[in-house]
């Protein structure tokens, strides 16, 4: 994996062959980031809705992109990385939430999302 230049990190773009590409979070990254929107201080969860730990690669990639930052060290579980949203991470998560709830959404996708939400509420 190529490291981003400081300029690319600051602008949220990645350059390949002289062309700039806007960094977009994956669905997993976006799900993790959006869970911090409703938490005090933007605290990001350690576990998903199913009780499984989020993959460290997801967490570390969000930190590398500047969407999350380590918050504090957990003295009981030092291998757990407790993070919170950054300003950029909050913007990415809010934009993702807006896209997920837009009026242009496919009705079939909305129905599937509603069914899944009903199962895990």
Image: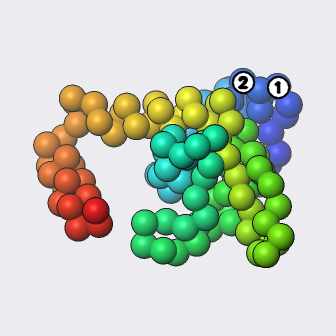
Is residue 95 shown above or below 48? above
The residue singled out by tag 1 in the image is: 7
Q: What element carries label 1?
A: helix
Is residue 81 shown above or below 69? below
Q: In this view, does 42 lie to the left or right of 16?
A: left
**Contact? badges 2 and 1 (CB < 8 Å):** yes
Circle 2 crowding by C-alpha within 10 Å: few under 14, some 14–19, many from 20 = few
Q: Where is residue 5 in the image (x, y as percent from the top left)?
A: 84, 34
The residue at the point 23 percent across, 67 percent down is 119
Q: Where is residue 52 in the image (x, y as percent from the top left)?
A: 52, 75
Q: Where is residue 92 in the image (x, y as percent from the top left)?
A: 55, 34
Q: In this view, does 60 lie to the left or right of 53?
A: right
Circle 1 crowding by C-alpha within 10 Å: few under 14, some 14–19, many from 20 = few
The residue at the point 74 percent across, 62 percent down is 81
The residue at the point 56 percent across, 39 percent down is 24
Name the image quarter holding residue 65: top right
Pick the quarter of the image with the N terminus: bottom right
Q: Is residue 39 left or right of residue 116?
A: right
Q: Can residue 34 be seen in this view?
A: yes
Name the image quarter holding residue 57: bottom right
Q: Is mark 2 on a helix, strand or loop?
A: helix
Q: Distance between the residues labelled 2 and 1?
A: 6 Å
Q: Position of residue 98 (x, y in %)?
A: 37, 31
The residue at the point 82 percent across, 25 percent down is 7
Q: Is residue 36 left or right of residue 84?
A: left
The residue singled out by tag 2 in the image is: 11
């Amino acid at each position: 994996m190529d490291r981003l230049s400081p300029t690319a990190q600051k602008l949220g773009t990645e350059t390949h062959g002289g062309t700039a590409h806007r960094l977009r979070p994956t669905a997993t990254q976006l799900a993790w980031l959006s869970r911090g929107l409703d938490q005090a201080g933007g605290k990001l969860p350690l576990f998903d809705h199913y009780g499984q730990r989020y993959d460290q690669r997801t967490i570390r990639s969000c930190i590398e992109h500047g969407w999350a930052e380590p918050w504090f060290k957990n003295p009981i579980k030092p291998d757990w990385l407790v993070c919170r949203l950054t300003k950029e991470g909050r913007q990415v998560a809010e934009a993702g939430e807006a896209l997920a709830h837009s009026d242009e959404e496919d009705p079939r996708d909305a129905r599937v999302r509603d069914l899944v939400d009903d199962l895990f509420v």
